[in-house]
Amino acid sequence: MLPSELLIRLQAHEPLLWINPQIRCQRDSFDPTAVDEADRLLRRAGPLMARGIPEIRPEGLVESPLLEADALRDALAGSGRWLLKADHQMPLAGSVKARGGFHEVLEFAERVATGLGWAGDDFAELGDQPWRDRFAEYRLVVGSTGNLGISIGLISRMLGFRAQVHMSREASEWKKQLLRDKGVEVVEHDGDYACAVKAGRELARADSQAHFVDDERSSSLFSGYAVAGRRLAAQLAEKQIDVSAENPLLVYLPCGVGGAPGGIAYGLKSIFGEAVHCWFAEPVDCPSVLLQMAAGLQQAISVYDIGLENHTLADGLAVAQASMLSCGCMQDRLAGIFTVSDEALSEYLRLVWTVLAEKLEPSATAGFAGPGWLADSAPGRQWCEHHGVDVSRATHVIWSTGGGLVPEAVFREWLGA
């Protein structure tokens, strides 16, 4: 049951901070050993990835840098140490969707190749033309508002698979055109993200040579995203940053359906435990994960059910109903969720460009509101006091989730908005 006061504030499109009561009401439906397997697969596939993505040679590791962002902290009057996890710089895909999307396609490629007699000794040979020709008989299908479609479409085409991306009404035109230019079939829908996912799922179900990448339910995607926790831990160690109860790690993640931020949070909690606190950021008109978690997991709920319209400048976050897989895993792992207005997203986009010269898309800027909520709001300060968190001693990691492939003309339009 959704508290009436929270309902009123959500319906008013009021930016707010929701603290997760962290009550577990059901078991995880996710096997934690899947993260180990995903990590091994991504590493084994390194030689194959390096063949298709020159910028990650020679080791073939698809990862983004961890950038210093204290200049942004100063511009926003924050405290502590600020870092930008720059997933907008992810090779090939240009977004947070790369790890999960690449993992699921590689997993499918391995399964198909093994079924066709591949011995599994050298992943790099799957980039040879004979294998590309055989992969061309198979198709990857996905429903997306944009970035997952780009991730799945581009890696599929790189390996020789056909790819079909079902895109909702929120998807940007430039993302559709980018996919078409790379040989990906784009199917446009007048409905929202859920409609695009449903259409893709039904089509793939009728095609024995197709594999559907299910952003709402896929454990393969989720485990690929969770590998990010290990990658971030290594980057923090390289910077000699201690993570402990006295020096906590606060992570702010833009959130759409919940799969990518949920996977990342899951991976981070498995490594740092109570020393890391993960926060999701959602648009004021699309708080699907906040709504689902606040209402409980007994029954799925949509933002349409409370009168919201699921409209936002942040196309990648325009999701009306949350992933139940992710919400189930976040029950007692997520610290909370804050909502952000479209106006704030535009302001953060311009600020990041001015201060850090980083080109983000609007959805990727949602996390920048997080440190302010903890330092300046009554519920944020109360949460810090309850958990013994001193934000001035914390390491704040803001996850920038996309924007690396945005055309210059589109970005300039955003800057002038």
Image (tube, rainbow, N blue to C red):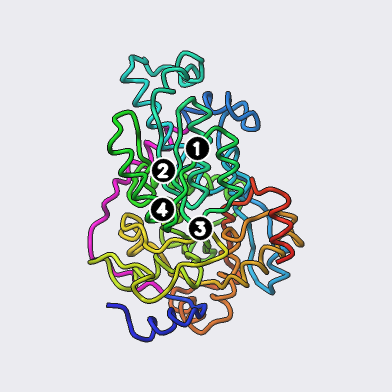
Taking the magenta stretch, the answer to whether it contains residue 31 is yes
Q: Position of residue 65 (x, y in %)?
A: 63, 46
Categorize mark 1 by other alpha carbons within 10 Å: few (<14), some (14-19), many (20+): many
Categorize mark 3 by other alpha carbons within 10 Å: few (<14), some (14-19), many (20+): many
Residue occupied by mark 4: 259
In the image: residue 370, left or right of residue 197: right
Q: Please state which amino acid type lies under the numbered disc 1.
A: Gly
Range of residues picked out in magenta: 19-42
Residue occupied by mark 1: 153
Q: Quadrant of the N terminus?
A: bottom left
Q: Are marks 2 and 1 in contact (CB under 8 Å)?
A: yes
Categorize mark 4 by other alpha carbons within 10 Å: few (<14), some (14-19), many (20+): many
Q: In terms of image quadrants, where is residue 366?
A: bottom right
Please tell me which residue lies in front, 315 or 16: 315
Q: Position of residue 50 (x, y in %)?
A: 58, 27
Residue occupied by mark 2: 142
Look at discs 2 and 4 and give the one toward the viewer: 2
